[in-house]
Amino acid sequence: MRKPPPPAPRPLAPPGRRLAPAARREALLAAALPVFARLGWAGAGTRELSRAAGVSEPILYRHFDGKEGLFLAVLERAEGSLVEVLRRRAAPARGAARLQALADALDEILDRRLVELRVVAAAGAAAGSPAVLEAARRHLTRLGEVLTELVTGAGLRRGVNPAVAGGLLLELGLGAAVLVPLGVPLLTRERFRAPALRLVARALMG
């Protein structure tokens, strides 16, 4: 039995109406984010990316330097989105409450920003693109620095290095970016995730 043809891509603008360059660029970034999250750097091609955006490949190249340029822009946007969640959740909290706020931030990221987290995690596997690997190193370093900044002075247990605590939280997030999309039962059960995050917070607190 023949499979039905895939649905036609939804256009970025109504027929006969052209988007302004800035709006077109934003629409391309929004459409590319879930494609890169699902297929990774290597698996996503300009054909899939342009189809997801409902445009031709020449239009994609008009706004970005091919797949690499588009991925770098998506990666930067993804890191900014993750940092926004971390700061919004944790910065207002003080003392030990900040660690719990960071645990809540990770929970929000896994529920609402998983595609961004997956893009950042996938960037480190971009073999064959030194520019993407360098960008991945830079953005992951930035996330680690933000986490370290937020745990500093947050009631850490004596002897716990804030940089080590920040790195641990980063590793937890990246591990979840791999396990949650696979449907690993432990990570998808609410009765596991919340207690696990509280356990980490208690281990770091004084």
Image (cartoon, helix red, strand yellow):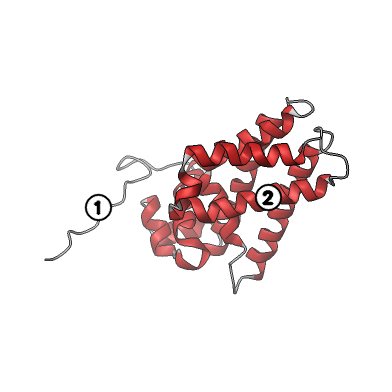
Position in image of residue 19 (x %, y %): 43, 42
Is residue 4 in view from this perspective?
yes
Q: Residue at x 77, y 36 (%)?
A: 205
Q: Nearer the viewer, residue 199 or 43?
A: 199
Q: Residue at x 49, y 57 (%)?
A: 36
Q: Residue at x 59, y 61 (%)?
A: 123
Kindly identify which numbered label has been placed on residue 149. none
Mark 2 or 1, nearer chain start:
1
Identify the secondary structure beneath mark 2.
helix
Picture quarter with the C terminus? top right
Does residue 100 appear to the left or right of 22 in the view shown?
A: right
User: Which residue in the structure is indicated by mark 1?
Assistant: 7
Position in image of residue 98 (x %, y %): 73, 30
Q: Three-letter amino acid code at disc 1? A: Pro
Q: Three-letter amino acid code at disc 2? A: Leu
User: Which residue in the structure is indicated by mark 2?
Assistant: 170
Q: Nearer the viewer, residue 11 or 130?
A: 130
Picture quarter with the N terminus? bottom left
Q: Residue furthest left?
A: 1
